[in-house]
Amino acid sequence: MDSARAQVVADLSACGYAKLAPQAARAALELDLPGLAALRDSWARLPRDRYLRDGGHYRSRRHSVFTYTPATELLQGLPQRAHWQPTAYNALHGGMERWFEPIEPAVAQAAAWRQLLSSAGALFAQLKSVERWYVEAHQFRIDTAGGIGRPTPEGAHRDGVDFVIVMLVGRRAVRGGETRVFEAAGSAGVRFTMEEPWSMLLMDDARVVHETTPIQACDVGGGERDTLVLTYRAGGFQQPDAQQT
């Protein structure tokens, strides 16, 4: 195993998370950073999130689903489906089906995108033996047009999956947005602010909870924070009837 990837696996095994600078992420996951950078404009075309229960209008997003089979290294895009979480994991938005617009085909079919999802799936398979990963991909833009932007309005939480990746795509003219990761069964944790595009946080969702603090604009023109969140689950997609498909 490559030493960079081995270090990520060791960190996830030891403490439930791994925080990577862009070049470390590139090395561990064999990322095509220029290829990913070519997709950044798509974050400016995200539709508004219509499901925010706090009355806010600060979040835009797209969502798509995939499967990844480690044995064959096959990543497959699936028909659009609702994003659903139980209230046990998301007290604010859990318990309802949320239908978001899918990620643009030019993004979902890009080689750099597929490499990211596949390489992450292969890495997580080194920590948990699975036949297939059920992958959800979320493009987020949090903006400050209305004042405060909240990356995690539900607060500190787990996602109800096996592994989570939060990747910073970019941030402009904002302050705040501190990421916090704490033991789910204890009090130890870390706090840091992701500043560099393509820096990344990988988490074992059963072992840690996470949140990101609100952002505010640095000037009157407002600003935004763009992220990509990927979740990997072995037991199928979460859905209301608990039947995994």
Image: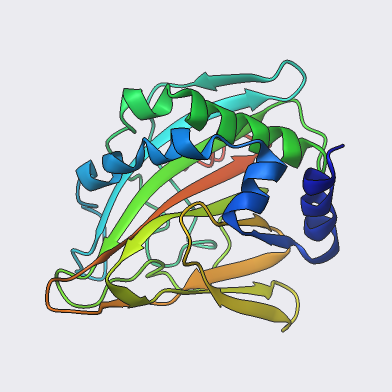
Q: Residue at x 58, y 62 (%)?
A: 158
Q: Indicate left or right for 188 with 113 as reference.
A: right
- Vertical placement of 165 versus 133: above or below? below
Image coordinates for residue 169, horizontal then vertical, percent: 42, 52
Q: Indicate left or right for 158 with 79 as reference.
A: right
Image coordinates for residue 93, horizontal then vertical, percent: 37, 60
Is residue 142 visible in this depiction of the protein?
Answer: yes
Q: Residue at x 46, y 31 (%)?
A: 65
Image coordinates for residue 108, horizontal then vertical, percent: 41, 27
Residue 199 occupies which quadrant of the picture?
Answer: bottom right
Is residue 245 visible in this depiction of the protein?
Answer: no
- Vertical placement of 147 versus 233: above or below? below
Colour scheme of this structure image? Answer: rainbow
Q: Indicate left or right for 100 with 131 as reference.
A: left
Name the quarter where the N terminus is drawn.
top right
Of residues 168 and 236, the one drawn nearer to the viewer in this rendering: 168
Q: Residue at x 65, y 78 (%)?
A: 190
Of residues 139 and 31, the one drawn nearer to the viewer in this rendering: 31
Q: Indicate left or right for 167 with 37 as reference.
A: right
Name the quarter where the C terminus is drawn.
top right
How many callouts does the rendering have?
Answer: 0
